[in-house]
Amino acid sequence: QVQLVESGGGLVQPGESLRLSCAASGIIFSIYTMGWYRQAPGKQRESVADITIGGTTNYADSVKGRFTISRDNAKNTVYLQMNSLKPEDTAVYYCNADYTGSLGEYDYWGQGTQVTVSS
């Protein structure tokens, strides 16, 4: 019953922008840390950005100053605004929901959305 559905990926040229969305259902969204990960062909999956229940954000060094993560608890949705895209940003981007606390440990993943940056 838990679902994370990513959208907004596509093909863009270097320097352009994309906005990814992840809509969650089946969880109490407001108590989960939300994050974005990516995996390029032949490489390990890596963390891109995350945002806590209090709104604190963290970014990979490779995207600092270019990407912005945000969340809208009323819509159960987390976003990733990606500006000044580079070819090395090409990857499948995955949405993640994580809870670790008194209620247990829960971790969920979306199916991913393809981002391709090429001229």
Image (cartoon, grey):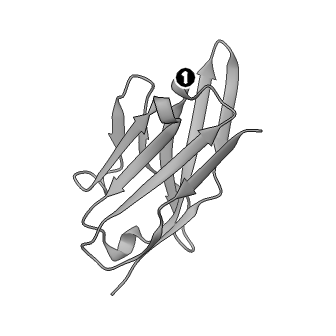
Q: Is residue 50 left or right of residue 61?
A: right
Q: Position of residue 87 (x, y in %)?
A: 35, 76
Q: Is residue 25 above or below residue 110?
A: above
The C terminus, quarter of image: bottom left
Q: Answer few, some or many: residues within 10 Å of disc 1's Cα (few below 14, many 20 plus, some between 14 and 19).
A: some
Q: Badge 1 is on which residue?
A: 31
* Closest to the observer, 16 or 35: 16
Q: Is residue 65 left or right of residue 44?
A: left
* Closest to the observer, 55 or 60: 55
- In the image, farthest residue toward the bottom: 119
Looking at the rendered structure, the kind of residue marked 1 is Ile
Q: Position of residue 111 (x, y in %)?
A: 65, 57
- In the image, farthest residue toward the top: 102
Q: Position of residue 89 (x, y in %)?
A: 39, 68
Q: Is residue 68 left or right of residue 101?
A: left
Query: Residue placed at 55% from the left, 74% from the top?
Result: 41
The N terminus, quarter of image: top right
- In the image, farthest residue toward the front: 74
Which quadrant of the structure image shows residue 29? top right
Q: Position of residue 79 (x, y in %)?
A: 42, 47
- In the image, farthest residue toward the right: 1
Query: Residue placed at 68% from the left, 30% from the top?
Result: 106
Q: Is residue 63 left or right of residue 90?
A: left
Question: What SS does tag 1 mark?
Answer: helix
Q: Is residue 68 above or below residue 14?
A: above
